[in-house]
Image (tube, coloured by chain):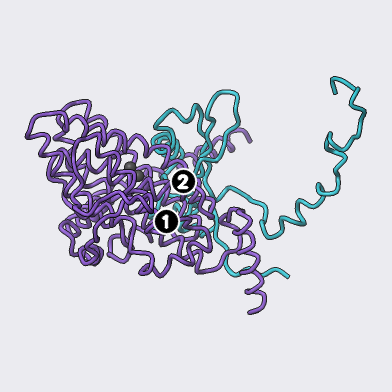
Chain colours: A cyan, B purple
Amino acid sequence: MRLYLQKNHYGDYGDGHAGGLEQDANQDQQKQWPLWEVFMRSKQGLDHKHAGSLHAADATMALENARDVYTRRNEGVSIWVVESKHIHASDPDAAAEFFEPANDKIYRHPSFYDLPDSLKHM
Amino acid sequence: MDQTANQLQDQFQQRIDLEQKIEPKDWMPEKYRQTLIRQISQHAHSEIIGMLPEGNWITRAPSLKRKAILLAKVQDEAGHGLYLYSAAETLGISRDEMYEQLHSGKAKYSSIFNYPTLSWADMGAIGWLVDGAAIMNQVPLCRTSFGPYARAMVRVCKEESFHQRQGFECLLQLSKGSEVQRQMCQDAINRWWWPSLMMFGPKDDESPNSKLSMQWKIKRFTNDELRQKFVDMIAEQIKLLNMVLPDPELTWNEQTKHYDYGAINWEEFKQVIQGNGPCNKERLEARKKAWADGAWVRDAAIAHATKQAKRKAAAQTYSAKETE
Ligand SMILES: [Fe+2]
Ligand SMILES: [Fe+2]
């Protein structure tokens, strides 16, 4: 049995707080800048990796803020920003079932195969 | 219900004991969430308020080099505040709520920033002692049990080392200077030493939240343990400056292999925490003014973004019609 007592996470605490500028465009009381997630490529050839989040009014400002907050010492050569509300995440409480299919397939790993030591280059 | 809650608590503690990090979407006891919100937001507020005493000397730095260094350091502190605010936000509190708590006086920040910066040597003493004490606290926090907090602290710690080094170097230069410069250096050390020791918080037997924080591995060392480490470190480093710490009782203890030190004035600490320090009012006023003065910028940015979004939507509708 699973019980959700309280859940809050990235981009999941209400559009009023965390984003939704486009939808809220007509509501003049929109005050807080939306939340963005920042992904950074630390050097050419590597993946973009989550660095953190920040608030900005639009994508241009989010990129500039990300540069100022996360790359003051050349930590990045490329930045992606995405509004936090657009991130969909798997449910950690259902992680066991969700990732279960991979659990019993040990033959997917090279160490599953017992081969003679004399076999070289494999 | 109670039983399920207990089960969840047990599972949670097991994960902590196994050194598994807790992530924002994971189940956590409400008290854990609240403790973290309080600690992380107070930490963030300290970084932000901490810019004020040093900001005081940016325009009066003795050389262009020192000015650039100080500017970079203060900018780092702003960055630290931002890393920490976004870590706290993953726990379900909004940025504006945290600002509101700071501005209303409900949330605290480190008591050290309520002391004035009277001379240029204070920039050195702050870097060496205040950032030094902060690092002592922050390094173990890189392994704290809440993932976003730990990751934020890794970034912070990478940057802090420059803060402490530039501070010591600043004092080292003064310590080799004229008699007036040497006096200035000693005076700054005298004024910042005791407040730096208070940064580690109340003594262990008077720190009620400590036990739970240790059990949840939010904290990994007690206040007194960290304070002792700091004293041992500084008592050695000061020899290179040919200065003295303002504590006649400071002596090496051969048995404990630590430095013994004199009694801390906890009454002063209490007064500063309660708002009666030399600069409490000034700091909070400056912060509130900055927030109020920036209101039109925040509103204008929102208005601009809204207008751009509408224009873009209109253009898309128009070009969709064109191609029909
Ligand atoms: Fe900092
Ligand atoms: Fe610092």
- The quarter of the image that holds ligand 1 is top left
Residue B279, image x and y in percent? 17, 56
- Front-most of B307 and A45? A45
Callout 2 secondary element: helix
Q: Quadrant of residue B107?
A: bottom left
Crowding at dot 1, Cα within 10 Å, few <14 / some 14-19 / many 20+, comes out as: many
| Quarter containing the N terminus of chain A | bottom right
Q: Who's the residue at 50% across and 45% down the image?
A: B151
Q: Three-letter amino acid code at disc 2?
A: Ala
Residue A30: % across, % down? 40, 56
**Cβ–Cβ under 8 Å for marks 2 and 1:** yes
Kind of residue at badge 1: Ile
Alpha-carbon distance for marks 2 and 1?
A: 10 Å
Location of residue A27 in the rendering, given as x and y in whole percent from the top left corner: 42, 57
For label 2, the residue is B152
Q: Is residue B235 above or below residue B39?
A: above
Location of residue B234 (image quadrant): top left
Pick whichever, A119 or B300, lies toward us.
A119
What subunit carries mark 1? B
- The response on whether ligand 1 sits within 8 Å of label 1 is no
Q: Which of the labelled discs sits on residue B40, or is there none? A: 1
Q: Tell whether B21 sits left or right of A116.
A: left
Foreground pick, B258 / A60: B258
Residue under the image location 30 percent in, 48 percent down: B252
- Left or right placement of residue B212 versus residue A103 in this view: left
